[in-house]
Image: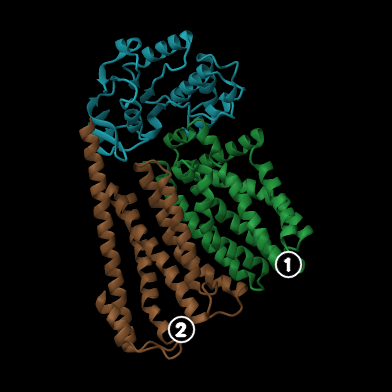
Chain colours: A brown, B green, C cyan
Amino acid sequence: MAAAIAMIFLVAPEDADQGISQKIFYFHVPIALTAYAGFGLGALKALLLLWKGGERYDLESYTAIHQGTIFGALTLLTGAIWAKASWGVWWTWSSNQLVLFLVLFLFYCAYFMLRFSIEPGARRERISAVYALFGVALIPVSFFAIRLANDFIHPTVFTREGPQMTDTMFAAFCVAWAAILALAYLMYRVELAGKRVDANLRELREVLSQ
Amino acid sequence: MSGYVADVVALARKDLRLELRARDTLPAMLLFVLSALAVFHFALPVGAGDDAAYGLLWVALVFTALLGLARAWAPERAGGVLDGLVLAPCDRSAIWLGKTIATLGFLVAAEIVALPAFALLFAPLDATAVAGVVLANVGICAVGSLLAAMAASSRARELILPLLFLPLSIPLVVGGVGSSISPEGGKYLAFLGLYDAVFAILSWASFEYVVTE
Amino acid sequence: MIRARGLEKRFGAKRALQGVTFELDPAATLLVTGPNGSGKTTLLRLLAGLAAPTRGQLEVDVERAELGYLGHEPLVYADLTALENLDLYGRLYRVPERRERTGMLLERFGLWEARNDRVASYSRGMTQRLALCRVLLHEPRLLILDEPFTALDEAGSELLDRELAALVGERTIVLSTHEPARVEKLATTVLALS
């Protein structure tokens, strides 16, 4: 993580057009990709739950989606900062990535609402899993829809593609991505371990009270 | 196969019969969509143009569908009937398909009144726009009847359905509005067709998991 | 017919059922007893396949079409008539000579006069009789009856006594009750939950 930060600020050359504000690119895009990874992992575990069954997949799917949502919220935040720095506005509907993340953020917030309003048990595990699978189907469909919508909602589209990335910029980007992915995975393991301990404790308490 | 069709027909026909008897859902949907159109007249500033009206039409259609979907599983919930249907030897997806067809019937019935009313009061609708409505209806009811079954298992029930459904309806609104206002409407119809195929198959395959353990 | 070993059902951390083990052969009648909250309904829902055990093994050797389940709720549509409800289930279960069988059951359970009334207008006892008709409609090999005497008047209870007596030994029956005296003589096995 520290190496990534050093590389971003010390090694990678500054962008000619955007200057220092371009540095947020090294956070924004890896965070977004990490959020996708969280949603994808959540859906994969959901599929395993439906296919094989087992409480552990439910917990893993939920935790992965939780991390995905946290990083999704961070994507919106860093995207807003970048939009402010580059275009002078906090929000722009013409950034496909930001709009997609808004849709996904709303979708996965609904996932949590759904989950918390069903009694714990096998039914909840299955319903959550099915909704998580709808999420990964929604990502490409929404992506496509937002591209299509730009045709009639926004005649002019800001493009984010500046000059091509140089080798050092690309290396810094990859290191930053690896660092954020590793951070997300660590958070995933920690949350999962916490949740498992919690579940075991509750079960133990139940046994002791009998 | 013919057995599957017979099950679906029996289940959908039962929903239509229930609606004809209780008249809970369809009159509410009709009144809602007409009231919404009346509200839109006042929500659209002078000179807003037809495009804005088409956009609002789609908002009205989505919320009208939500009104119907929120009640979709109410008859089953009343006497625990969903357990009875799940225990019956029919394929579980037939339960979903029967409900999807029934809600589609109600939505189409509401639109048969709403679309001419819209054309009369706001802006004309061409064949592409109507085709967009038809294709979007399929997606709305296919996804909606599955999500409504999920919502029916939760404590929040009617409250949670719009939260589950609206993010999934955004691509449908894009396709629908695009088919109403874009000169290249065919592209949007193809997109709606794609959405229908993806989510109808997903809903068909996953319904069993929503109603069983 | 049924083999259950170490059945356990939890809802989150809450345990509804624990360590249930039994075997049942096709001619057996199992009586499940226990106080409120002892997990009778949970066990019967597991046996019917409406819920899955959290732990343990459960084998029930019948197809869905051969299972008749009577739950706490009647599992019929309140806004359909008795005839329409049974007709729908008859179609789904592919009952041969649906109309004759439906009419015969309604007659036997004293609902023929009320066959064209909506279930919503029925008394609780009549609804329970209709629920029993629904269970028996497709002549199931395995009957799972959760508190079948609930809401029945004396005539209804005697009717059900006779129906059960005719089925015992012919079919596999699992029934739960919190007042076992009425059916004790029919049972080949008793499972007391605590």
Q: Nearer the viewer, residue A2 or B139?
A: A2
The C terminus of chain C, quarter of image:
top left
Answer with left or right where residue B158 lies relative to residue C179. right
Mark 2: few/some/many CA within 10 Å (<14, 14-19, 20+): few
Amino acid carrying label 1: it is: Asp
Q: Residue at x 35, y 68 (%)?
A: A34
Tell me where residue C138 appears, x and y as whole percent: 44, 26
- Where does label 2 land, which residue? A161
Q: Chain of mark 2?
A: A
Tell me where residue A89 appears, x and y as whole percent: 53, 76
Tag 1, which secondary structure? helix
- Where does label 1 land, which residue? B50
Q: Chain of mark 1?
A: B
Answer with left or right where residue A103 lies relative to residue C171. right
Image quadrant of residue A176?
A: bottom left
Q: Nearer the viewer, residue A64 or B120?
A: A64
